[in-house]
Image (tube, grey):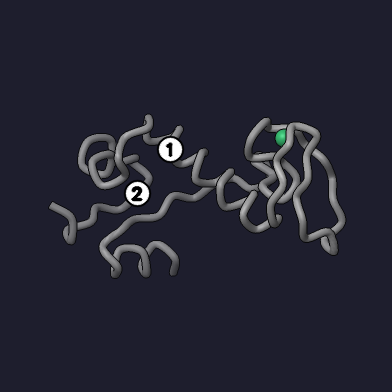
Amino acid sequence: MLRYKAQEAGGWAMEADSRKLKPSQRCQLCGRLEKKPLSQRWHDCPCGASCSGDENAAKLLLSWVMKQIGGREPAKAWREVRPASLPSNPALP
Ligand SMILES: [Zn+2]
């Protein structure tokens, strides 16, 4: 459904292995892992990172995507290095 909705909006979606990335436990700045209870909504890390847990997870996932597409601008990466696991998107040039 997410892939369909992304395509409908002219974008694309990548699936991240959250069991490996652990976006709710891993710091988006330094990569440090810290197990946190679900009730802990704020991310504070000895490296100085301090933001909401949602923001930390979103930035971690964005960094992961950018690494997967080799730092390219996403629409350009779609044309150049579209991962084989992604469906084609006729909405993009
Ligand atoms: Zn950190």
Residue 92 in the image, given as x and y percentages of width and height: 18, 55
Does 29 sit above or below residue 55?
above
* Label 2 sits on residue: 86
**Which residue is drawn at the image coordinates 78% and 39% (left, top)?**
45
Does 23 sit above or below residue 9?
above
Q: Label 2's element?
A: loop
Q: Which mark is residue 53?
A: none
Residues tagged 2 and 1 counted as in contact (Cβ below 8 A): no
Could you tell me how far apart the alpha carbons at marks 2 and 1 are, in whole angstroms? 16 Å
Position of residue 33 in the picture relative to residue 9 (left or right): right
Residue 13 in the image, given as x and y percentages of width and height: 40, 55
Answer with mark 2 or mark 1, whichever residue precedes in sequence. Answer: 1
Residue 40 in the image, given as x and y percentages of width and height: 83, 59
In the rendered image, the quadrant that contains the N terminus is bottom left
Position of residue 33 in the picture relative to residue 51 (left or right): right
How many neighbours does mark 2 have within 10 angstroms: few (below 14), some (14-19), or many (20 or more)? few
Residue 22 in the image, given as x and y percentages of width and height: 69, 44
**Which residue is drawn at the image coordinates 31% and 44% (left, top)?**
74
**Which residue is drawn at the image coordinates 30% and 58% (left, top)?**
11
Whereabouts is ligand 1, in terms of quadrant?
A: top right
How many neighbours does mark 1 have within 10 angstroms: few (below 14), some (14-19), or many (20 or more)? some
* Label 1 sits on residue: 66
Q: Label 1's element?
A: helix
Does 82 sit above or below residue 87?
above
Position of residue 67 in the picture relative to residue 60 (left or right): left
**Residue 48 occupies which quadrant of the picture?**
top right
**Which amino acid, by three-letter code, is at mark 1?**
Met
